[in-house]
């Protein structure tokens, strides 16, 4: 569970169980929340939970297979502000698995595509599209003032850089990786250095080697999204200092301590 001490260490960027630390960059609560839109959330989330989601800010880095689904689910849940970062454009190879991709947006910025998609799905959600790749020069300015960062990247060096920025900014990060029938998820707090353990033996980009069918990013991104929501609402157990291995070929879900 998230402690008050840890919450204070995050410079007011994360929700606590009883009080939200003041952060001038937190989203303002919408004047009117569409009650009917979130009616099916009601038995899972309280009215205060829904309001917290509406005031939250999440940054999704990568708008491809994982990121597109995460953006879709966070937006449908009512997370008020989602920054989406990706310098790539859609092409035909994305159509098998990326929910933001369709036959009419080939060549379009993935970040802009995310904004257009959410305008149709939930216009109450603010999407801030950043049509560039994260790098050492822009990382801090793009990532600061968020409650949670989502790692939806497909490059190990970029993931390690993202973890460094999240740590320096005091923001928790939800990691997800996929390849073929397999995936993995972990929630990383500042100082955990989880990715150094995940990639201790080095690794190749397994997605290229194993491919990526549609169901793998859909499954792994769902788990990432649930981790984000638990962080925002301070609910349940999270995968901190643990990693979940998903094997959809054998329907095996195993959690290991790190």
Image: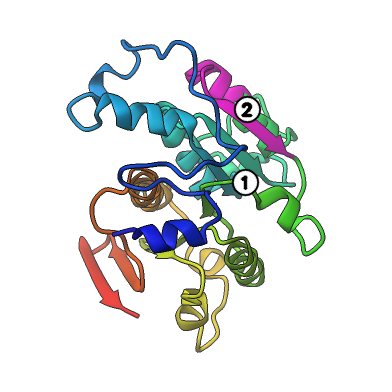
Q: Secondary structure at mark 1?
A: loop
Quadrant (top left/top right/bottom left/bottom right) for the N terminus: bottom left
Numbered disc 2: secondary structure: helix
Q: Is residue 201 left or right of residue 234?
A: right
**Relative to the observer, which residue lies in front, 136 or 95?**
136
Q: Residue beneath label 2, please?
A: 115
Tag of residue 63: none
Mark 2 burial class by Cα count in 10 Å: few <14, some 14-19, many 20+: many
Whether the magenta-drawn stretch holds residue 109 is answered as no
Q: Is residue 254 left or right of residue 155?
A: left
**In the picture, residue 151 is in which quadrant?**
bottom right
Please state if 8 lies on the left or on the right of 23 as rendered.
left
Q: Which residues are drawn in magenta?
A: 116-130
Instruction: Indicate the quadrant containing the C terminus: top left, top right, bottom left or bottom right.
Output: bottom left
Q: Position of residue 47 (x, y in %)?
A: 28, 24
CA neighbours of label 1 inside 10 A, class few (<14), some (14 to 19), many (20+): many
Lower position in the chain sequence, tag 1 or tag 2:
2
Q: Residue 209, how many percent across, how many down?
A: 53, 69
Q: Is residue 180 visible?
A: no
Q: Which residue is mark 1?
A: 145
Q: Are marks 1 and 2 in contact (CB under 8 Å)?
A: no
Q: Residue 87 location, x and y as percent?
A: 74, 47
Coloring scheme used = rainbow
Does residue 215 sit above or below 181 in this rendering?
A: above
Residue at screen point 65% across, 51% down: 143
The number of callouts visible is 2
In the displayed structure, 233 sits above or below 163; it is above
Residue in the foreground of this view, choosing between 206 and 103: 206
**Magenta-drawn stretch contains 119:** yes
Where residue 56 appears, x then y in whole percent? Answer: 48, 36
Residue depicted at x 23% and y 52%: 236
Rendered residue at 66%/72% (across/down)? 157
């Amino acid at each position: 569970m998230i402690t008050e001490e840890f919450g204070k260490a995050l410079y007011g960027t994360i929700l606590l169980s009883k009080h939200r630390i003041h952060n001038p960059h937190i989203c303002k609560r919408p004047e009117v929340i569409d009650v009917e839109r979130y009616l099916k959330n009601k038995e899972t989330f309280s009215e205060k939970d829904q309001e917290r989601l509406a005031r939250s800010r999440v940054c999704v880095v990568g708008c491809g297979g994982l990121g597109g689904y995460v953006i879709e689910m966070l937006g449908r849940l009512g997370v008020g502000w989602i920054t989406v970062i990706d310098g790539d454009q859609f092409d035909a190879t994305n159509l098998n698995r990326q929910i933001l991709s369709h036959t009419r947006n080939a060549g379009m910025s993935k970040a802009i595509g995310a904004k257009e998609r959410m305008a149709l799905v939930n216009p109450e959600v603010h999407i801030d599209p950043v049509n560039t790749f994260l790098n050492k020069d822009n990382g801090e300015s793009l990532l600061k003032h968020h409650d949670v960062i989502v790692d939806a990247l497909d490059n190990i060096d970029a993931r390690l850089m993202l973890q460094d920025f999240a740590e320096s900014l005091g923001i928790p990060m939800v990691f997800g990786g996929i390849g073929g029938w397999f995936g993995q998820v972990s929630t990383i707090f500042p100082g955990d250095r989880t990715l150094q353990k995940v990639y201790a033996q080095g690794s190749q980009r397994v997605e290229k080697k194993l491919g990526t069918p549609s169901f793998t990013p859909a499954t792994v991104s769902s788990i990432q999204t649930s981790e984000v929501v638990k962080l925002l609402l301070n609910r349940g157990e999270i995968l901190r200092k643990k990693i979940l291995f998903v094997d959809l070929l054998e329907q095996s879900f195993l959690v290991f301590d790190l």
